[in-house]
Amino acid sequence: MEEKDIYAELSSIRNLMERSSKFISLSGLSGIMAGFYALIGAFIGYKVVYTDNNGLTLGNHYANDPVAWRSLFFIAAIVLVLSLFTVVWLTIRQARKKGEDFWNPVSRRLLTNLSIPLITGGLFILILIFRGYYGIIISASLLFYGMALIIGSQYTFTDVKWLGVCEIILGLLAALIPGWGLIFWAVGFGILHILYGSIMHFKYNQ
């Protein structure tokens, strides 16, 4: 009994230390929802940009068309706003369910470290759009997002780091294989988020 009590005490201490140094109220369901938003956005983007009124695929016809890229940027912005709203709402609900304060020193450090690469990436993408370098916009979004996840993972679940690694790999592939950017975007922000969110939900949020 004494040995079991020691192990129980050590486990309690470890949990307390983890709670004080890591934000563990991230909602896996929010990742799933963000993934579905991205897939819907990618589908709409494909329909708007890559097909004409007769449903014919136009291929790379719009590759350097500013109007087409503005449409994709607008769709991506809507997906981003919906995803952020869902993540914040479900994470606050998850924190309250666990009896934790959502806005604490750890969550502030997490948000700060996520914001630096995300804001930098967003400004860089705006510069690319302004300069007309449309071919690497999707690659840049995946790369900066992946770096943000890896940096932020030190303040939350380790699983987030591996999602970031996968996003970076997809970003490099998107730069290497032009013309497939929308597919890589859908996989990175859609399918990977759904897989990651499902793992997080069943692993931590039940």
Image (cartoon, rainbow, N blue to C red):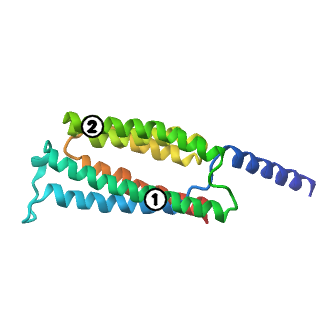
Classify residue 46 by image quadrant.
bottom left
Quarter of the figure with the N terminus: bottom right
- Left or right: 178 with respect to 160? left
Residue under the point 29% across and 43% down: 138
Residue 204: which quarter of the image?
A: bottom right
Which quarter of the figure is the C terminus placed in?
Answer: bottom right
Tell me if I can see residue 176 in this picture: no
Mark 1 belongs to which amino acid?
Phe
Q: Can you give x and y, in whole percent of width and height, for residue 139 in the image?
A: 30, 40
**Callout 2 secondary element:** helix
For this orientation, the residue located farthest to the right is 2
- Camera-near label (1 vs 2) is 1
Residue 40 visible in the current orientation: yes
Mark 1 vs mark 2, CA separation in Å:
29 Å
Residue 16 in the image, given as x and y percentages of width and height:
76, 49
89 or 56, which lies in front?
89
Mark 2 surroundings: few (<14), some (14-19) or many (≥20) residues within 10 A: some
Residue at 12%, 51% in the rendered image: 59
Residue 85's x, y, as percent? Answer: 46, 59
* Mark drawn on residue 175: 2
The mark that comes first in sequence, 1 or 2, is 1
SS at mark 1?
helix
Decide: is 67 above or below 46. Answer: above
Task: Give the vertical position of 198 relative to 130 (above or below).
Answer: below
Q: Residue at x 45, y 41 (%)?
A: 165
69 or 51: nearer the viewer:
69
From the viewer's side, name the closer residue of 2 and 11: 11
Q: Nearer the viewer, residue 187 or 140?
A: 140
Whole-percent x and y of residue 162?
49, 45
Left or right of residue 94, residue 130 in this image: left
Tell me the kind of residue under disc 2. Ala
The circle on residue 85 is 1
